[in-house]
Image: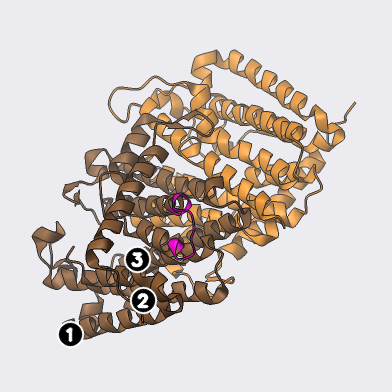
Chain colours: A brown, B orange
Amino acid sequence: MTTTTPPQDFAKRLDQTAEDTEALLAKLLADTLLADEIARPKRLMDAMRYSTLGGGKRLRPFLVVESAAIFGVAREAALLAGAALECIHCYSLIHDDLPAMDNSDLRRGRPTLHKKTDDATAILAGDGLLTLAFDIITRDEIHQDPAVRLLLTRALARCAGIGGMVGGQMLDLAGEGRFGDREPVDVARLQQMKTGALLRFGCIAGALLGQSSQKEYQALDDYGRALGEAFQIADDLLDVEGDAAALGKQTGQDAALGKTTFVTQLGIDGAKQRVRDLLARADQALSIFGPRGDVLRAAARFVAERKN
Amino acid sequence: MTTTTPPQDFAKRLDQTAEDTEALLAKLLADTLLADEIARPKRLMDAMRYSTLGGGKRLRPFLVVESAAIFGVAREAALLAGAALECIHCYSLIHDDLPAMDNSDLRRGRPTLHKKTDDATAILAGDGLLTLAFDIITRDEIHQDPAVRLLLTRALARCAGIGGMVGGQMLDLAGEGRFGDREPVDVARLQQMKTGALLRFGCIAGALLGQSSQKEYQALDDYGRALGEAFQIADDLLDVEGDAAALGKQTGQDAALGKTTFVTQLGIDGAKQRVRDLLARADQALSIFGPRGDVLRAAARFVAERKN
C-alpha cells in the first residue's frame, strides 16, 4: 500500500521548485554568459527574460525534479535540465502568440512579447531560447557522464521537434483550416505531439538522469503519456466549463474556432471518464516505485483537476 | 614549403561534398523518421525540404568535411555533422526572410518559403530545422565517444545562439534602426556573430571530431575567424561591385538601407587590403598542418574571391 502525498505538501513542493527554477533561469538569462564572457545583446536578453521570468507553475521543471528525485538525483542537476525544458516551453509560447500563428495579444494578463516589443524581436527571442536550451542541457553540472547528457539532449530534440511539439503545432494549424480546407484531426496524436511530448520529456528526464533500468524508464514514459493526455483533456474541459477569471483568459475559444478537441470527440462526461482512466493508468505505471512515486501520483491529480 | 591544391581539384571536392550533403539532407528530411518510425507532418516536411534541398554551395558542410579530413575523420561522420550545421544555416535564412525580419520575396531566384507557403509554415519549418540540427548532431554515427558528440553539440548551440548567430541578427536589426534610432554598430563584432560564428563552427568541428590537440584546435579556430571575416567583407564588396546576374540578387542593398559595413568603414581599397591580411592570417594559422591544410587554404581564397 502506498499513501498519497498530502496536497499541502504537494503545493509547497511545487512552489519551491517554481521559485528555484525562476532563480536559475534569471541566472542563465543574465546579460553576460559567464562561461566564456560573451556579451549578449541587451534587447534580446530583455525580450527573453520578459517571456521566461515572472511566474508560471513551472510544471515541466517540476516533473523533471520529481522524476529525478525517485532515483536520488541531485536537485541542482534536475533543476538545470528543467530550466532547459522550460526554455523550450517558453520559446514555443512566444512563437505561437505571433500574428502569423495564433495572433494573441495577452498571455497571463500581460501583453505578449511581440505586442510589448515587435515581431522581429519575438522571433529572435524564441530562436534564442530554443538554442539556449541545447546549450544548457549539455552542461557538465547536469551529469558527470557525457553519455547521459547526450541521451537527454537527443530526447529533448526529439520531443521538441518535428515528430513532437513543432509537428503537433503544424497539425493543429492544419486542423483549424489554416491551409485551405480543415484537415481531419486525430486529437490524441496531435496532442501527444503538441503538448504531450514536452510533458513526457519532463518525466523521462528523471529516468535518464537517474540511469534507471529499462523497466523504470518505461514506467515513467507510460506515466508521462497518461499525464500529458490528462493535461490536455483538462485544458479542453476548462475551455468549456472553466472560470474565465481564474483562467486569466477567455473560455469558449475552441468552440469559437470550431476546433476538434477531446470534448467534441468524447463529450463532457466521456472526457471526464477518460481523465479518470488516465489517472488510473498513471497510478498503475508508478506502482513499480512504491511510495517513491507519491509526488508524481499527486502531480497527475493536480494536472487533471486544476482550475487554471 | 606547402603547395596549393589546384583550383580544379578544389572545385571538384566542393561539388562532391555539396552532392553528398544534398543526398544526406534528403534522407534526414524524409517523411518518416527511421529511428523511431514517427510519422512527420507532410506539410512541414515539404516546407523544410523546399528550403533545404536544391542546391547551394554547401560551404559550411564543406568546412566540416575538410577540417575533419585533416585528422583522418571518417567522411560519413563529418558529413552528418555538416548536415546538422546546414540545417541551422537554412533555418536562419527562412526566419530572416520573413516579413517581420528582412521581408524578402526571393532567394536563389525562387520564392522564399513564406511566399511559397505562408508565414506560419515558415516559422514552424525554421523551428523544426533548428531543433532537428540538435537531433542530428547527437547521433551515434558522428563519433563513438559520446563526450566528443557532446562537445560538438554544445559548440553548435553556442555558435548558433544568443552569443552567436541569433545575437548577431539582433545587433544587425538594431543597427538598421529597426527599434528606434539606429544603434551604433561594431561591424567586426556583429559579423563575427551573425555570419562568422557558423563558419567558425564548421572549422572547429573538424578539430573536435578529430580529437585534436589544443594547439590544433586553436589553429582551426583562428583560421575560422579569419575566414568568417573574409567571407563577410567579400559579401560587402559584392554588394558594391558585384554583378547582380551572377549574384542572383540586387546589388546596392546595403547602401540603400544605409547600413554600416566593412566597406563603409574601410573604403573599397581598405576592405580589399583587409581581405589580403585575413588570407595571410588564415595561411599562418594553417601552417601547423603543412600540406594537410592545403584544401582549407584554397577554401579561404575561394571564399574571399567568389563572385556570388
* Residue at 55% in and 73% down: B36
Identify residue for label 3.
A195
Q: Which mark is residue A215?
A: none
Q: Real-space Cα distance between discs 2 and 1? A: 18 Å
Crowd band around label 3 with a 10 angstrom C-alpha radius: few (<14), some (14–19), many (20+): many
Q: Percent position (x, y) of residue B246?
A: 59, 37
Looking at the image, can residue B223 be seen?
yes
SS under mark 1: helix
- Indicate left or right for B143 with B269 as reference: right
**On what subunit does the disc labeled 2 rest?**
A
Q: Give the foreground label among 2 and 3.
A: 2
Q: Give the foreground label among 2 and 1.
A: 2
Tell me, yes or no, whether the two marked residues, 2 and 3, touch with CB atoms within 8 Å.
Answer: no
Judging depth in this view, the residue of B16 and A122 nearest the camera is: A122
- For the C terminus of chain B, the quadrant is top right
Q: Is residue B46 above or below residue A123?
A: below
Q: Percent position (x, y) of residue B134?
A: 54, 54
Q: Real-space Cα distance between discs 1 and 3? A: 22 Å
Identify residue for label 2.
A226
Crowd band around label 1 with a 10 angstrom C-alpha radius: few (<14), some (14–19), many (20+): few
**On what subunit does the disc labeled 3 rest?**
A
Q: Which mark is residue A269?
A: 1
- Indicate left or right for B66 with B270 as reference: right
Tell me, yes or no, whether the two marked residues, 2 and 1, touch with CB atoms within 8 Å.
Answer: no
**On what subunit does the disc labeled 1 rest?**
A
Instruction: Tell me which numbered mark, 2 or 1, is placed earlier along the sequence.
Output: 2
Q: Residue furthest right?
A: B1
Q: Is residue A157 highlighted in magenta?
A: no
Mark 2: which amino acid? Ala
Q: Which residues are magenta?
A: A68-78
- Indicate left or right for A257 with B76 as reference: left
